[in-house]
Every structure is written in structure tokens, then in C-alpha cells.
Image: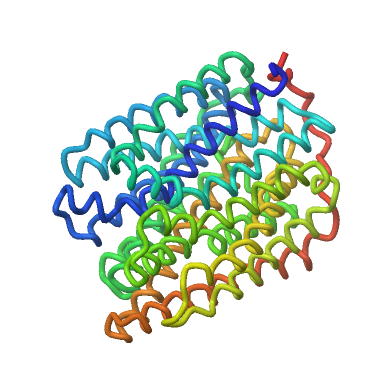
């Protein structure tokens, strides 16, 4: 059991921070009733968390490399627990949104360390098992958020969505202290504060621009200002990468497989998860399903399929070239989304199930093997940096998808004057774009990632985290 304590600790933290991305989707109506707030205002309960998580995870990875991954991971759990309590006690929507943003800070600190902790802890056969299980947890958490939120909201209250995090955080801390030893990058020198600030501003501004575009349009003045600020900060960040110790070493992107796998992570999260909020809206507003039923129809099939693949075939998938597991997995997501894009006014929630199962099989193939392949493409002392880049692009993919898909969805509803036909048309259009996104990613990987990634000769191995 002690051998797997690091894996349990990492999986608990990963599940928490990912499930909280979408766990409040089905709880928004209840929150709106309590605070008498407009539903569109409460979108920031979702967006505030995704924004801070995407903007800060790469900087947190750099901090973890330099100041200790175990220390950073434990700090992230502490921040996440405190912010969850603040969310549960929030007296109004402004306090809740602030708590969600703080949650993103803690989530970023945890997320930046997950893949690196596994990479330094497990080797050979155990490494394949660990990444397989961790990847399955990734897929289950992202898809199961609406289901978990529905169960808690319907049977308790929306505040329980956040209170449930506290005991899980305590268990994660116990397993981390018990089984994980400290590791950090061996180099010295200064911390790249300018690079960290400029990247955080760039990611935050660009993500905010994408989210704002979904609400106010792509030509809105605030949207354009956010994009301009983000691009300026990105230019400053790229200039800063010439420093002696940059937060992100751009030479990593000289390896085509690394770059393509990072892009694949972006596209996979956009295609697999960004349409889920709109499925929930259709299930609840048009079909009249309750929170639990909406989660069962709209999330459980994908979560179950991803878990089965990751748990039963994770070790086997690690032996196959990433070109096939990631590329074909993305194609499965594309097919699954296409199967769902057949909604009409006579459809029930059951119409989503076959497509969600197929997409879940793809998620179970992509997430664990994509992560381990990215880690294998970089020197081991750069694991924290690579993990931060991977997780940043994952969350930016989710934010991009929500913004773009949301624009399409709301425009189709407006064209249909809010009728059931308009909702069905909007969801179908969203799913078709998601399918095309996954198809593009799959083709990109199959064409450009020609061989299985092999770990480059690098710095000497650091001590194993399990004893």
C-alpha cells in the first residue's frame, strides 16, 4: 500500500481540481435562487476558476521545479481547502466568484505537480500502471463534475458541492506526507519573476477575452482590449525566455512530437469537455430533467467509459506508440461527438448515451498516454516545466471551447427564438464543431508524431518518492 501512496495522493488532488471545473454547472439555478442573481452573472462561478487555473499552472510548475514539488503540492491542497470553505460560506455571488478564483490558485499549484510527481516516483511497469490510473482519473473527473454536482445539489444543497472537498483534502494531505518525498530541479540561479508575471497576464487576458467573446461577441470593445493586452504580454513573455533561467524553455518546442502532443492536449479538452455545460442546459431547460438525471445522462456514460479504459488497459496502452493511442483516441472522441449531434424535439437524454460512451473510450486512451508521452520528450529535471505547459494548454483548451461553443450555442438559440428547436439546433452545432476539433487533432498526431517518444538522456534520476 505504501508503494502506491504517491499515486493515491496525486489522484485525489487531480480529481478534486478537475471535478471542480464543471461541478457547479447543474447547481447554478439553485445558487441563482439563493442569491437572486442573474444566471449569466453566475457564469463567472465557472469561468473564474477555469481562468485562474489556466493562467497560473505554468508559473506554479516553475515554482515547483525550484522550491520543491511536494511542498508546492501540499501548499496547493491547503489553498484549495480554505477557498472551498470560503465558497461554501459565501453570502453573495461576488464572494463566491472570489472564492472560486482562489480555488484556481490552489488547483494550479496541485495540477502543476501531478505528472512530475508520478514521473519521478514510478519507473518501468509501475510507471505505466500509475499513468494509466491517473489518466483515467483525469477523464472521470472532468466528465463526472456535473453528475457529482447534481447528486449533491439535489439531495443536500449547492453549498455541499464545496464542503465535500474538505475531507478529501485532508486525506490527500495524509497520503502526500506519508508517501511522497521532496524533489526539485538541480539547477540554481534566480526565479524568472518577469516571465512568470508576463505569462500569467497573457494567459489570463487571452482566456478572459475568449470567455468574454462568448458572452458579448468577438467585436466587443472589452473583448478586443483583452486580446490586445494578452498579445502584448505574450510578446514580453517570449522576450523574457531569453533569460538564463526562463520559466518555459522554448527549446522544448523544437521537438516536433512534444509540440504536437501539447497541441493535442489543447484540442482534446476543447473537444471532449467544453460542450458539457450546454448539454446540461438542454437537459434541464428543455427536457426538464433534475440535476441528478442531467448528470446521469450527460456525464456518467463518458466518465464510466474513460475509467474502464484507463483502469483495465492503462498499462497496455503505455506500450503502444503515442501516435496511435493519442491519434486514434482523438478520432474516437470525434466519432462520439458526431453520434451525439442528432438531437431533435423528440429526443430524450438517452440519445446522448451512445456517443458519450464512444467519446469516453477516446478520453481513456488520450489522457494517460498523452501525459506520459509529453513527460518522455523532456529531460527529467524539466518535468515540472513540461507538466505545467501540458496542464496549461489543457485548461486553455477548455476555456477556448466553452467560449467558442457558447457563442455558437447562444446564437442558434436566439435564431430559434428560444424554442426547443433552437436549443436542439444549438447543441447539434456545438457537437459538430467539437467533432471537427477532435478530428483535426487526431489527424495532426497521426501525421506528425511518427514514433513512440523516448526519454532523452538527461540529468541523473532523482530519489524515488516512495520508500
Residue 328 % position (x, y): 75, 63
Q: Is residue 238 visible?
A: no
Would you say 112 lies left or right of 75 here? right
Q: How many marks?
A: 0
Q: Nearer the viewer, residue 457 or 136?
A: 136
Percent from the top left, x then y, of residue 290? 35, 58
Expressed as whole percent of the image width and height from the top left, the position of residue 366 reads 69, 54
Q: Nearer the viewer, residue 201 or 243?
A: 201
Where does the C terminus fall, quadrant-wise? top right
Image point 52% across, 26% down: which residue?
Answer: 73
> Measuring 37% from the left and 46% from the top, which residue is drawn there?
49
Q: Quadrant of residue 289?
A: bottom left
Looking at the rendered image, the quarter that the N terminus falls into is top right
Q: Is residue 116 left or right of residue 236?
A: right
Q: Residue, x 42% and y 57% (percent of image)? A: 293
Whether 224 is drawn above or below 93: the answer is: below
Q: Residue furthest left?
A: 36
Where's residue 35, x and y in %? 16, 48
Report whether 331 appears left or right of 414. right
Q: Is residue 232 above or below residue 216?
A: above
Q: Quadrant of residue 422?
A: bottom left
Amino acid at each position: 500500500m505504501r508503494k502506491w501512496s504517491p499515486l493515491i495522493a496525486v489522484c485525489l488532488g487531480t480529481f478534486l481540481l478537475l471535478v471542480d471545473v464543471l461541478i457547479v454547472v447543474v447547481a447554478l439555478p439553485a445558487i441563482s435562487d439563493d442569491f437572486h442573481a442573474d444566471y449569466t452573472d453566475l457564469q463567472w462561478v465557472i469561468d473564474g476558476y477555469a481562468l485562474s487555473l489556466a493562467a497560473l499552472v505554468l508559473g506554479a510548475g516553475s515554482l515547483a521545479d525550484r522550491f520543491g514539488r511536494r511542498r508546492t503540492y501540499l501548499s496547493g491542497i491547503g489553498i484549495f481547502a480554505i477557498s472551498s470553505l470560503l465558497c461554501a460560506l459565501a453570502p453573495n455571488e461576488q464572494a463566491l466568484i472570489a472564492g472560486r478564483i482562489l480555488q484556481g490558485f490552489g488547483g494550479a499549484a496541485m495540477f502543476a505537480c501531478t505528472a512530475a510527481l508520478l514521473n519521478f516516483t514510478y519507473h518501468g511497469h509501475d510507471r505505466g500502471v500509475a499513468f494509466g490510473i491517473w489518466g483515467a482519473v483525469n477523464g472521470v473527473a472532468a466528465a463526472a463534475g456535473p453528475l457529482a454536482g447534481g447528486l449533491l445539489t439535489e439531495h443536500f444543497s449547492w453549498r455541499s458541492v464545496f464542503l465535500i472537498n474538505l475531507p478529501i483534502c485532508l486525506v490527500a494531505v495524509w497520503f502526500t506526507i506519508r508517501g511522497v518525498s521532496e524533489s526539485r530541479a538541480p539547477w540554481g540561479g534566480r526565479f524568472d519573476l518577469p516571465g512568470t508575471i508576463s505569462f500569467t497576464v497573457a494567459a489570463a487576458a487571452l482566456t478572459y477575452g475568449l470567455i468574454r467573446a462568448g458572452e458579448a461577441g468577438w467585436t466587443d470593445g472589452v473583448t478586443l482590449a483583452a486580446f490586445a493586452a494578452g498579445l502584448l504580454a505574450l510578446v514580453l513573455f517570449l522576450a523574457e525566455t531569453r533569460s538564463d533561467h526562463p520559466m518555459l524553455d522554448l527549446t522544448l518546442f523544437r521537438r516536433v512530437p512534444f509540440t504536437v502532443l501539447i497541441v493535442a492536449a489543447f484540442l482534446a479538452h476543447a473537444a471532449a469537455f467544453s460542450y458539457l455545460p450546454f448539454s446540461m442546459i438542454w437537459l434541464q431547460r428543455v427536457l426538464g430533467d433534475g440535476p441528478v438525471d442531467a448528470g446521469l445522462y450527460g456525464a456518467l456514460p463518458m466518465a464510466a467509459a474513460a475509467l474502464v479504459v484507463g483502469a483495465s488497459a492503462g498499462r497496455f496502452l503505455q506500450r503502444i506508440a503515442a501516435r496511435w493511442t493519442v491519434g486514434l483516441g482523438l478520432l474516437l472522441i470525434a466519432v462520439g461527438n458526431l453520434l451525439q449531434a442528432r438531437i431533435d424535439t423528440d429526443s430524450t437524454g438517452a440519445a446522448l448515451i451512445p456517443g458519450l460512451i464512444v467519446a469516453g473510450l477516446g478520453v481513456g486512451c488520450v489522457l494517460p498516454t498523452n501525459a506520459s508521452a509529453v513527460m518522455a520528450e523532456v529531460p527529467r529535471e524539466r518535468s515540472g516545466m513540461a507538466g505545467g505547459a501540458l496542464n496549461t494548454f489543457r485548461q486553455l483548451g477548455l476555456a477556448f471551447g466553452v467560449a467558442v461553443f457558447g457563442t455558437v450555442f447562444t446564437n442558434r438559440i436566439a435564431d430559434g427564438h428560444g424554442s426547443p428547436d433552437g436549443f436542439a439546433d444549438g447543441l447539434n452545432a456545438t457537437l459538430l464543431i467539437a467533432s471537427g476539433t477532435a478530428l483535426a487533432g487526431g489527424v495532426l498526431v497521426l501525421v506528425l508524431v511518427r514514433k513512440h517518444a523516448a526519454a532523452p538522456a538527461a540529468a541523473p534520476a532523482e530519489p524515488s518518492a516512495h520508500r
